[in-house]
Amino acid sequence: MNNVKLFFAVFLLFILEGTLFAGPLGDGSPYVIHATLIGLMFLGRYGKLEQALGFGLVFGLLYDFVYSDIIGIYLFALSAIPLFSSFVLKYVKENVLTILVTFTFSAILYELDIYFFTASVVGVGVSFQELATQIIPRSLVAQLIGIIILYYPMTRLVQSTLDEKRG
């Protein structure tokens, strides 16, 4: 039952990411809060790492089917990036600031991972300079907002499901 609750929570984030958390900024440029990735990073940090990997594979494949022409790019990214952030947080003293910095840096790695894999397979219409100067800074702000919004609900949900399993 606990895994089902977490699965539906991440699935809700997946749905919200494609509908509510994506839209144009004031100047018309797009932004996306990677809510699924953020949820998986919280699951990897506060839950079981194996569960985060499994959910990352499932939602990465779902993301590939729904949003991408290439199968495997998001499958790899949504399973590898939460593992990376979880490993980094094992070696630093954990507090809200280190969570914010690590998860934001991981989200930027996610953006770069998607860009380079897509560029190497099918090519992209965005130059790296445009990515670095326009897309990444806006994405950085969007991911910080997403992490702050999801911090309390996700930590509470993951920790409550772990407490239910123990007791």
Image (cartoon, grey):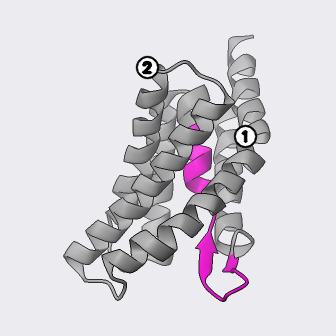
- In front of the other: 56 or 127: 127
The reply to whether residue 34 is in sight is no
Looking at the rendered structure, which numbered label has been put on residue 45? none
Magenta highlight range = 23-42
Q: Could you tell me how far apart the alpha carbons at marks 1 and 2 are, in whole angstroms?
A: 20 Å
The reply to whether residue 143 is in sight is yes
N-term-proximal mark, 1 vs 2: 2
Question: Percent x, y for residue 88?
Answer: 43, 29
The residue at which mark 1 appears reads as 151
- In front of the other: 76 or 33: 33
The residue at which mark 2 appears reads as 91
Horizontally, residue 121 falls left or right of residue 112, namely: left
Residue 76's place in the image compared with 159, above or below, is below
- Looking at the rendered image, the disc whose residue lies closer to the viewer, 1 or 2, is 2
Residue at the image point whose x is 69% and y is 80% from the top: 25
Mark 1 crowdedness (10 Å alpha carbons): few <14, some 14-19, many ≥20: some
Which element type, helix, strand or loop, lies under badge 1?
Answer: helix
